[in-house]
Amino acid sequence: MKLFIAGLATGVILTFSGIAFLENTYPSIRGADGNIFSFASNLYKSERTAPKPSEYNRDTVTANVLRVVDGDTVDIEVYGERQRVRYIGVNTPERNEPCYEQATQANIDLVLGKTVRLVRDKSDTDRYGRLLRYLFVDEIFVNKVLVEQGHAEAVLYNPDEQYYNLFRDLEVAAKNARLGCHLYDIFEDGNPKR
């Protein structure tokens, strides 16, 4: 019994020593009511109530790429929620079209498993509920690189036109150099708008 009481006393002393250490190291650790335990409770609550996609700043946000759907679409995780993102201003071959695998692989190489910065133009989502964004991995502008390498064509999705002229010029250069999917003439539908 004496051993049990000694162990219990040691545990209580260590607990209060730990609390004292935390209070001295982190003076703001107490909750609004002055209770150190309410701080931990509030911290837990704040994690559970992270902003929903409709509440966060949609102009620029950082996310993790979970899955590459195809050459111009990815699934991301942002604030603990999975979202589908369609790249603005570009279009890549669809499944069962020539160069689909190459365009998808180019996108995988650029973004899969990476942290990306998503930047909005004017529209928030498309008719399918996908977020419409420009993607950046560090300083690499993913939409631009896909067009530059010939894996995507420039497409004007009104009203999102901020980089359309740049993409169009890069597409012309990639086409002239017969880069990527331009070898298959897959982008020759003559329609720059969608």
Image (tube, rainbow, N blue to C red):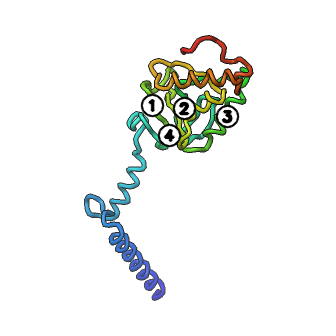
Residue topped by disc 3: 106
Q: CA distance from mark 3 to mark 4?
A: 18 Å
Q: Nearer the viewer, residue 61 or 174?
A: 174
Instruction: Identify the residue at horizontal 74%, vertical 20% (top origin).
Output: 184
Q: Residues within 10 Å of mark 1 (few under 14, many from 20)?
A: many
Q: Earlier in the sequence, mark 2 or mark 4?
A: 2
Q: CA distance from mark 2 to mark 4?
A: 14 Å
Residue topped by disc 1: 120
Q: Residue furthest bottom?
A: 2
Q: Residues within 10 Å of mark 4 (few under 14, many from 20)?
A: many
Residue topped by disc 2: 84
Q: Are marks 2 and 4 in contact (CB under 8 Å)?
A: no
Residue topped by disc 4: 117
Q: CA distance from mark 1 to mark 4?
A: 10 Å
Q: CA distance from mark 1 to mark 3?
A: 22 Å
Q: Are marks 2 and 1 in contact (CB under 8 Å)?
A: no
Q: Please determine whether, in this image, residue 62 is positioned above or below residue 133.
A: below
Q: Say which of marks 2 and 1 sits in front.
A: 1
